[in-house]
Structure formats: C-alpha cells, structure tokens
Amino acid sequence: MIRINENFTKLSSAYLFSEIARKIDAYRKVHPDAPIIKMGIGDVTRPICAAAIEGLRKGVADEADEKTFHGYGPEQGYSFLTERISRYDYAARGIEIALDEIFVSDGAKSDTGNIGDILSTSNKVALTDPVYPVYIDTNVMAGRAGERMPDGKWSNIEYLPCTADNDFIPALPTGKPDMIYLCYPNNPTGTTLKRDQLAEWVDYARANGALILFDSAYEAYISEDDVPHSIYEIPGAKEVAIEFRSFSKTAGFTGLRCGYTVIPKELKGVDGQGNAVSLNALWNRRQCTKFNGASYIVQRAAQALYTPEGQRQVAETIAYYMRNAKILREGLAEAGLEVFGGINAPYIWVKTPGAMTSWQFFDKLLHECNVVGTPGVGFGPSGEGYFRLTAFGRYDDTCEAVDRLKRLNLLASTK
Ligand code: PLP
C-alpha cells in the first residue's frame, strides 16, 4: 500500500499564479489581440549582466578542460564564492560571518522551504500576514500548520497582520511561537522594518527562545540608511536568526538559480532532553545528505557579481527596476490610489479603491485596461483589499501600464 503524506492533500490545489494564468487565458480566448501587460508574477526581465555572463563562460571553459574540470563540489558551496559573500555582504557592513556559516544553494525558495527539516514538527510557527506563500505551504506539508479554518487561516499558525492600519509593522506575537518568519524588504507589501523595529524582534526572540527565519532576498533594493540589510546588524541576532539571501532578484538569476543561507555557529536549538544543539551542524548534515551543491558554473557567475564591474552592473539593474517602482508609485498616487512600498523594494502594494476586493480589482484591471497584477488576498487574509504590482517589468511597459491606469479613472468608477 502506498500511503501518502496526507498533509499535502490539505493544500489548496488552486495555486495563486495558476488561477491568474487561467483568468488571462479565458480573457485571451475572447480578445486574442489584447495588449496585456503582466506585472503580476515576481520574475525579472533584465538579462544577466555582462560580468556574470563572463563568469559563466569561465566556468564552462574550466569544465571543458581536464586540468580545470570540476565534478561534485562542496555541498556548502565553493570557497571562491563564500569568501566573497563573507567579505562583501557582511564584513563590509561590520558583520563577521565565517565561511562555514554560509551555505550556497540553488536559491532562497528551496532553503526557506527546506529549513523545516532540521526543526521539530511540534514547533509553533508565527508569520506576518500577507506573506510569501512558501513559508506557510511548507509548514503545511511538514504537519506544523494544523487544519485550515473557515477564514482561510491555519489553526496552528499565528498570523501577524500587516496592513495600512499598523503601518505594516507587525505586532510582536502573543502565542509563544518557536519559529518566526520575517521577510524584509517584504514581499508582497514592499515595506520594511527600520533598525530599531527589527531590534525589537531580536530582543523578543532572545527573551523567548524563538528562532527568526529572516528572508532578505530583496536587501539589495534598500535605499534608506536606517533600514538594515542583514538581521546580523542587530546585536545578539546571531544567537537567534537564520538569514536567507538570493541572487535571483539582484542579478537576474531566477533561471540560473543561486542563493545562500547563513547559520551562525552561536545559534542553538534544543533536543528532547534540553541539550543545546548547533543548527549550523544540523543544516550541514542535512545539506550533505540531500543536496549536492549549486553547479560550479553558476557559482562562478555569482562570484563575478562581486567584481567592481559586477557590482556596477548589478547596481544599474537595480536602478532600472527602482525607476519603474517610482513611476508606479507616483503614477498610481496621481490616479488617487493609496500606494505603499516601492522605496526599498521592487514591489508596489496598492489599496483597492472603495470596497473592491482584491480579485474584483484584478478583474477590473484585466478587462478594462489589460494590466495584470496579483490580488493581495492571494498572500493571506490580511492582503484582502490590496493588490501587488511589480517593478520587474520593462520600462516601456511600466509607463504604458501607468498611463492606462490613470486613464481608467479608478476612483470615479467605485462611487
Ligand atoms: N523569498 C522571497 C520573499 C521571494 O519573494 C522569492 C521569490 O520570489 C524567493 C525567496 C525565492 O528566491 P529564489 O529565486 O532564490 O528561490
């Protein structure tokens, strides 16, 4: 008998982006020539920069020569890359991260999803709402989430609402969670925590024996000085936090695949007898067993991002997207909408006008101006009444989308 992991059957089959694709297909059947602009899914449009392409070429040339050929590599990543990460992403900000505290991977989705392997399924989880769906779904798969309730929430998960009412600053948990997911700059809201606000979370975790799973996939988009790039900028964070990073949105690696996770050696969990156990050691064991490392040529490409040309080219790409973010922010505000995010993040979070739901607003934009975004409710109950647009589109498309939205006279249509 093939018994399945029944937790998987608890997940809803209508994945958010499939539902969006279904609605676009249905619309296209009736309007095959509609000039649809997609600003929904968070994929990038700029090609991989020249420095990284050169890194890839070098990697390919190495693989073609028996003197430089690389087969299986270290599961934790090559030191030519971890050394750059440690120096440029951490030491440059006054943070000491040892090479064996860095684990290179094929991206932050896998790592944020897999990290639960080393944590007890009896742990209680808290997360901000709305949220990157991977954190919830992987906890459902592991059996940590409990049951889905009529309001769409999971019974064992503590939701920390982030809405305009609290300026998107989540209140500290009340349910004594063991694992807390924080993502800043945030997907989907595009908002951030300032240094003193993040410090409150680190203090909370230290006082309550909780682990913070800090996803900073968008840290390269931070433009304001008082917003921390790494949770380890906060004193004491190394004892309570794991940090996830990605080259996807920074350097167009969404297809190439590379990211990394930092697990400081100070960070300890406890076993059933109350003995302290290193999470770094457990993750290392997990990776060595289940993962054979990111590919050599991709790590060569990532290494090249840390050269002066690589850094300059990455900065240009980010500036390109952040120009889009500004156009979206300002254009939608001119159209009379309430707009959040887009200053330290490539996401714009829009309040839907009047009493419109997220999906009603989605349908309106698709049908009336052929612009596609993502309904906020798809990211969690507190996303209802909001809508996400990404700045990852092409510049011309972004300008055109804003023009169309302005012409729509969105506010008048809700009266
Ligand atoms: N974390 C967040 C918050 C994201 O929004 C995304 C991608 O959209 C990821 C992680 C996944 O990144 P990667 O491409 O490195 O798997």
Image: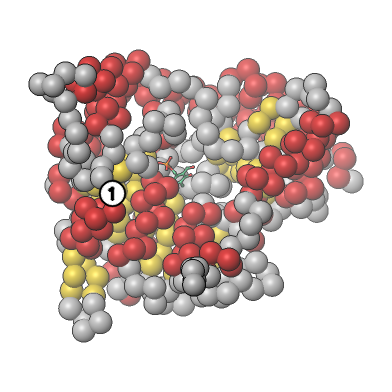
> Which residue is at a point 52% across and 25% down the rendered structure image?
45
SS class of the residue under badge 1?
A: loop
Q: Give the quadrant of residue 350.
A: top right
For residue 301, what is the image quadrant?
top left
Instruction: Tell which of 130 and 120 is nearer to you.
Output: 120
**Residue tagged by mark 1?**
291
Judge whether residue 304 can be spotted in this image: no
Residue 184 rendering spot, x and y as whole percentages: 43, 48
Task: Measuring from the top left, give residue 177's x and y in whole percent.
Answer: 41, 73
Q: Is residue 53 left or right of residue 33?
A: left
Residue drawn at x 70%, y 35% as measured from the top left:
372
Q: In which image quadrant can residue 404 be found?
A: top right
**Kind of residue sitting beneath label 1:** Phe
Q: Of 273 and 331, which appears nearest the observer?
A: 273
* Residue 182 position in % (x across, y down): 42, 56
Residue found at x 42% / y 40%: 218
Q: Is mark 1 within 8 Å of ligand 1?
A: no
Q: What is the basis of the colouring in this image?
A: secondary structure
| Ligand 1 image position (quadrant) | top left
Q: Residue at x 54, y 30 (%)?
A: 392
* Left or right, 317 with reference to 149: left
Q: Is residue 183 visible?
A: yes
